[in-house]
């Protein structure tokens, strides 16, 4: 085998079929079950997108009502899990605590070894219902606050704000958040989704697969990039400094977060919609700080595109948008999980529907076979 035969990072390699989503690099577009993601984000609530990803079609009004009622019925964490979460180190990253909490949910599942399709669907819905409360509970506990229970009369996004802050913001803010949920929901065989499918292929179970996916998403080269973008903006410090900062970062080959993508080469189709939501949040907040982040982002974007022809990805507008919504920076990637749990579990069910163990080969570059020399002769 030559180096030319090796696809490092599996770049350009197709490993399986999927009907969940399609990434089209030639048009910089993304569809979920055939629907353009920007159309779903602007015309549907996230609950409709979740239903679509799992069921293949957008729901009717009655189907959506039944779906939402099932989600509401599955909300709520056990006292045992909340007690465990109280013991988490306060300095632990929220993605680490979320990973552990999801693993604990698996311990509580008495039918964990049953991989029947209907059981997998029930678990997917349960994770979709419970992960927002895990994220909100962890946020409150790490800040010395008592958890807030979910409310049955609140939709998905509104309920999350309620569990975090004890109140629901204006509808315009909720819409910006809900839009981000749809944009982050699914993205074909990305690193965390592929991790989930690899783990699922061994028949380890849905909780193991999701726990593995959370571990993959945590990294700054994947889901953690939305956090890294916000830290980068804080480092830049002002709109006036943005262009000089970017030019220096390029000259010194500094890692610049929120730009470029393994698949898209001339723009991520999700970015314009999320950028609109970011701008909406700037207008809603109306503060000098909010305006500064907007102007800084525009300057960084324009400089990167003009200098390198590299475009921003979804994380670039999502990070500051979440910040303006009032979320702490370490919460950004757990919020990503709240959305992506739909795509992950759809892929897990698809993988197990016609399962083959995922086991690639490797190209060995170490020493040739040799004899062991006894220790007294070395």
Image (cartoon, helix red, strand yellow):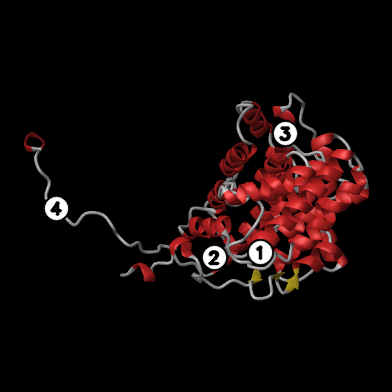
Q: Tell me which label, 3 or 1, sits earlier in the chain.
A: 3
249 left or right of 238 in image: left
Q: In which quarter of the image is the C terminus?
A: top left
Residue at mark 4 to residue at mark 3: CA–CA distance: 55 Å
Q: Where is residue 243 in the image (x, y as percent from the top left)?
A: 72, 49
Rate crowding at label 2 as few (under 14), some (14 to 19) or many (20 or more) other CA atoms within 10 Å.
Answer: many
Name the outermost residue toward the top: 144
User: For residue 139, which numbered disc appears in the image?
Assistant: 3
Mark 2 lies on a secondary structure that is helix
Q: Tell me which label, 1 or 4, sits earlier in the chain.
A: 1
Residue picked out by circle 2: 351
Q: Quadrant of the N terminus?
A: bottom left
Above/below status of 264 relative to 258: below
Residue picked out by circle 1: 309
Q: Position of residue 50 (x, y in %)?
A: 74, 60
Q: Tell me which label, 4 or 2, sits earlier in the chain.
A: 2
Residue picked out by circle 4: 370
Q: 234 or 207, which lies in front?
A: 234
At 86% across and 45% down in the image, what residue appears? 291
Rate crowding at label 3 as few (under 14), some (14 to 19) or many (20 or more) other CA atoms within 10 Å.
Answer: many
Foreground mark, 2 or 3, reads 3
81 left or right of 172 in image: left
Q: In which quarter of the image is residue 261?
A: bottom right
Foreground mark, 4 or 3, reads 4
Rate crowding at label 4 as few (under 14), some (14 to 19) or many (20 or more) other CA atoms within 10 Å.
Answer: few
Q: Tell me which label, 2 or 3, sits earlier in the chain.
A: 3
User: For residue 291, which numbered disc appears in the image?
Assistant: none
Mark 1 lies on a secondary structure that is loop
């Amino acid at each position: 085998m030559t180096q030319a035969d090796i696809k490092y990072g599996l770049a350009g390699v197709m490993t399986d079929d999927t009907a969940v989503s399609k990434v089209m690099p030639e048009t910089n577009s993304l569809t979920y079950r055939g629907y353009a993601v920007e159309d779903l984000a602007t015309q549907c609530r996230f609950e409709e997108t979740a239903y679509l990803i799992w069921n293949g079609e957008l729901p009717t009004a009655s189907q959506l009502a039944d779906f939402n009622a099932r989600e509401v019925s599955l909300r709520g964490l056990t006292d045992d899990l909340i007690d465990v979460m109280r013991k988490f180190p306060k300095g632990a990253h929220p993605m680490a605590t979320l990973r552990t909490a999801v693993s604990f949910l698996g311990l509580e599942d008495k039918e964990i070894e049953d991989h029947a399709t209907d059981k997998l669907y029930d678990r997917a819905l349960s994770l979709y219902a419970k992960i927002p409360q895990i994220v909100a509970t962890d946020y409150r506990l790490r800040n010395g606050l008592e958890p807030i229970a979910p409310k049955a009369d609140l939709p998905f996004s509104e309920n999350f704000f309620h569990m975090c802050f004890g109140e629901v913001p204006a509808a315009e803010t909720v819409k910006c958040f809900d839009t981000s949920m749809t944009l982050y929901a699914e993205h074909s065989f990305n690193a965390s989704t592929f991790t989930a499918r690899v783990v699922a292929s061994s028949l380890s179970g849905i909780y193991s697969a999701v726990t593995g996916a959370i571990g993959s998403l945590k990294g700054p080269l994947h889901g953690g990039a939305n956090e890294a973008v916000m830290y980068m903006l804080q480092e830049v410090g002002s709109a006036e400094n943005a262009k000089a900062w970017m030019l220096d970062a390029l000259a010194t080959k500094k890692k610049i977060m929120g730009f470029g993508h393994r698949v898209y080469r001339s723009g991520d189709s999700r970015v314009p919609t999320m950028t609109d939501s970011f701008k909406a949040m700037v207008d809603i907040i109306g503060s000098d700080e909010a305006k500064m982040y907007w102007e800084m982002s525009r300057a960084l974007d324009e400089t990167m595109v003009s200098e390198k022809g590299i475009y921003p990805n979804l994380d670039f507008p999502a990070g500051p948008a979440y910040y303006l919504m009032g979320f702490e920076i370490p919460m950004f990637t757990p919020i990503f999980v709240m959305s992506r749990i739909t795509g992950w579990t759809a892929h897990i069910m698809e993988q197990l529907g016609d399962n083959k163990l995922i086991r690639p080969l490797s190209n060995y570059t170490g020493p040739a076979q040799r004899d062991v020399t006894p220790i007294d002769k070395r």
